Image (cartoon, helix red, strand yellow):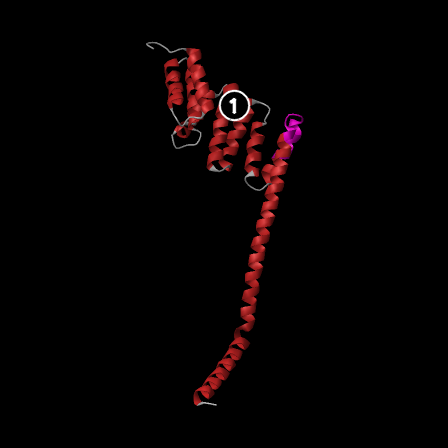
Amino acid sequence: MSDSAAFQEVDDAVRQDDLKRWWKRWGSWVVAAAVLVVVAVAAFVGWRQYDQSKRAEASTAYSAALAKIDSDKVAARTELTRQAETAPAPYSWLAALTVAQLQDKPADQVTSLEAVAPQLPPELSDLALVMAGFRSVDAGKLDEQVGKLGALAQGDRPFHISVIELQALAAAKKNDLKRARELWTDIVKDPASPQGAQQRAQAMLNYYGPGEGK
């Protein structure tokens, strides 16, 4: 055996002894850490599957409750109330929003929609308040509700066109047709306006006529 080979063999033996000593001291910790990683990964995957399963169940339950509304409104409202309290998001939010709309009287719908709005994420909160505005037409509270929606009429808010529609309706109810026509015209000319809103605004302009000086 050459000297270099002998030295290599001694070096390997020393390394093996060092490894044995290192493993004796730290091996159990390495195994424990590996087990923790495996458990964490398994738990994460299991949670995702569980979460997806719960969301699928919530979606089915929400759809079933909606299907009951026409035939048994009371039962549907009871089931949706339960879902609003126990279902995972976003179905708990949607259920709460639907329950508010299912109140018997328009005034109660307005109150419920306003109450649920702070519990919802921003866009759904805006939607709840805009819906309260439309319900207020039948509740005789249109002016009051429109006064609360000023910030939602800003161009960066998702339902600003709907708020402008409500402002136009409020102006028309006060016989301020000049202002109403201006708002309806803004809706018609705004390329970002939904087609339905443009059609409604144009219909109102046709109904009330061009106004003075037109």
- Please report the residue visible at 37 percent of the width from the left and 22 percent of the height from the top: 189
Does the rendering let one see residue 44?
yes
Write the residue at 55% across / 22% down: 106
**Location of residue 61 by image quarter:** top right
Mark 1 burial class by Cα count in 10 Å: few <14, some 14-19, many 20+: many
Q: Is residue 202 left or right of residue 91?
A: left
The residue depicted at 57 percent of the width and 53 percent of the height is 45
Q: Which residues are magenta?
A: 67-80
At which x and y percent is residue 165? 44, 22
Taken as a whole, is the magenta stretch helix, strand or loop?
Answer: helix
- Judging from the image, what secondary structure is the residue with disc 1 in? helix
Q: Is residue 131 magenta?
A: no
- Image height of 182 relative to 120, above or below: above
Depth check, front residue: 201 or 127: 201
Q: Residue furthest top?
A: 212
Residue drawn at x 62%, y 31% is 66
User: Residue 4, how many percent across, how many down?
Assistant: 43, 87
The number of numbered badges drawn on the structure is 1
The residue closer to the viewer here, 20 or 139, is: 20
**Residue 82 can be seen in this image:** no
Q: Quadrant of the C terminus?
A: top left
Whether 46 is drawn above or below 83: the answer is below
Q: Which residue is mark 1?
A: 135
**Percent coordinates x, y for residue 41 in the rendering:** 55, 57
Identity, as a three-letter code, of the amino acid under mark 1: Arg
Q: In x, y percent, where is residue 116?
A: 52, 33
The answer to whether residue 71 is magenta is yes
